Amino acid sequence: MITASQQFAASVVAELVAQGVKNFYLAPGARSQALAIAAGQLAGAGKLSLTVRLDERSLAFTALGRAMSTSEPSVIITTSGSAVANLHPAVLEAHHSGVPLILLTADRPSELRGIGANQTTEQVGIFANSLRGTHDVPAPRPGSIISAKDLVATAISQSLGGAKSPGPVQLNLQFVEPLSSGEPEAVKVLAGLEKRPLDFPEVPEDQIEIEVDDHTVVIAGAGAGPAAVRFAEKAQLPMFAEPSSGARYGSSAITNYLQGLSTSLAGEIRRVVIFGKPTLSRPVIDLIRNSSVYVAKSRQYGNFDIGRNAIASSWNLVPSGVADRRWLESWKAFQPISEPRAILAQTVWNAAGSVPLLFGASNIIRVAESCLEPKPKAVFSSRGLSGIDGSVSTAIGIAQAGSGARALIGDLTLLHDAGSMNISGLPNLNVQLIIGNDSGGEIFRKLEVAKNITPEMFSQLFLTPQKVDIEKLCQAYGWQYFSAANPTELGLAMKQDGYVVIDYKL
């Protein structure tokens, strides 16, 4: 027997595949069973990549990592109720960092809302204004099934950005009993559909010229990319590139610009040209707020104007003029900092190979900002909201793109996402979690609060020292565990393949 639920689910999943989407993520559930069957059928035929994870929060961050790495939408399939709410942290990060996700949230029929029905809540609007599009789709019933083609095309277009930045889209799909059947086969449905590749929006060609001089610097934040490098090198300007900018390389990149910003040299800056989203350090933000600002628009992060003082912005910035070479060289005089965290960051940064590197939002990325020598490298970081949530699962998602992943995170970041170390059902991947283990939240020592309360209260409320045995945690979840106390031991451990945790004691 063919049910309306299965017929519609097969059409939706097959249309997604036909229109170029191939990475699917599923958490088990009853209301979403028709979608699960369709995805499973297509995965079995090699038509899509399917990842099944136990909980929706880990699932969503894994999908996020894959989409970050590929720039293609990841599809997330969940059942109804609190399962949908568990996607929220990853949805927020995707919203703020311009990562395309398509959420297929199974729901009970609308007539069950607001009357106390089991596992039923208001799933439409649950993500507030963090979506590029929301579509509440009535339950398919015999003789009344919505066409999936246009619905899917709209969802894909919205997720890839259109006139906006990429981001998450929700298809809230209502289902009534019977919830599934073995037919129609999603593979047969796909065979009858027109195939087409993903249609990525083109970046507008408008541009502006910006006059540069010996009082101008380039700031490259998260997602800045090669455009920042080209601008800085053409104008012979110093470039302050964050570790996750994708621009920390080339002849203009400055290693320890934060030290320079603490000297009189900072007072000579009058104009800044911004690429990406720079949010890592207060001195850079203060510089932006007190300078004449020009901004390169970003498809990923949108228009950045944190000081509300941008003079102009454009998709393409072109320098007019060239700075004196001495202006650039004066910024290169500052040496990288040297401390245990810096040595850790440098060792990981300089490791051979092309393995993508994920920085967690911990103390280490802030130390890295002042010590990493310019070097081309595939780097990721969740800088949309700069949270530590989901870092383990994000690294797994990045690894799924094919080149493995190496994550440099703090011990609290690991423990915050320890449940994502459950690799049951995952294929063999090369994922390294390198833990800068300082037994707590040392990052808070840099904040005002460290001076305003007693050491005992500061330890209790902010350092939150942990007593978890990471080695036993690894044993429970099936990860290889290595302890490292110096760069040599770290280098040897980084040569290992598979699911690896390297516990670097600071």
Image: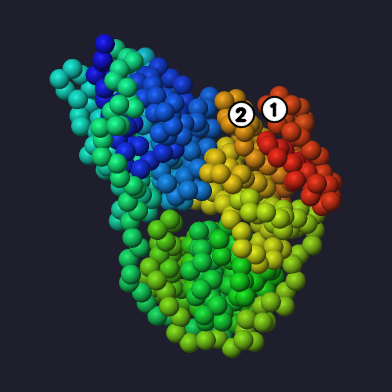
Name the residue nearer the viewer: 304 or 224: 224
Residue 58, by quadrant, is: top right
Say which residue label 2 marks: 423
- Compared to residue 21, the image places residue 242 above or below, namely below
* Kind of residue indicated by mark 1: Gly
Instruction: Please state the horizontal and vertical placement of residue 464, each as a whole percent of the image.
Output: 71, 38
Q: Residue at x 52, y 86 (%)?
A: 322
Q: Classify residue 281 as left or right of residue 63.
A: right
Q: Nearer the viewer, residue 41 or 265?
A: 41
Instruction: State the SS at label 1.
Output: loop
Give me the C-alpha separation between circle 1 and circle 2. 8 Å
Residue drawn at x 71%, y 44% is 434
Let me know if residue 85 appears in the view: no
Residue drawn at 71 percent across, 55 percent down: 352
Residue 458: give its label: none
Residue type beneath disc 2? Ile
Q: Compare residues 237 and 493 and report the one nearer the observer.
A: 493
Residue count near mark 1 (Cα–Cα under 10 Å), binned few <14, some 14–19, many ≥20: some
Number of marks in the rendered image: 2
Q: Secondary structure at mark 2?
A: loop
Q: Is residue 229 left or right of residue 201?
A: right
Residue behind mark 1 = 478
Q: Is residue 257 above or below residue 390?
A: below
Where, by quadrant of the figure, is residue 140 drawn?
top left
Q: Position of residue 482 (x, y in %)?
A: 79, 38
The figure's colour scheme reads rainbow
Residue 131 picture location, percent across and down: 36, 43
Residue 178 position by quadrant? top left
Residue 227 appears in the figure: yes
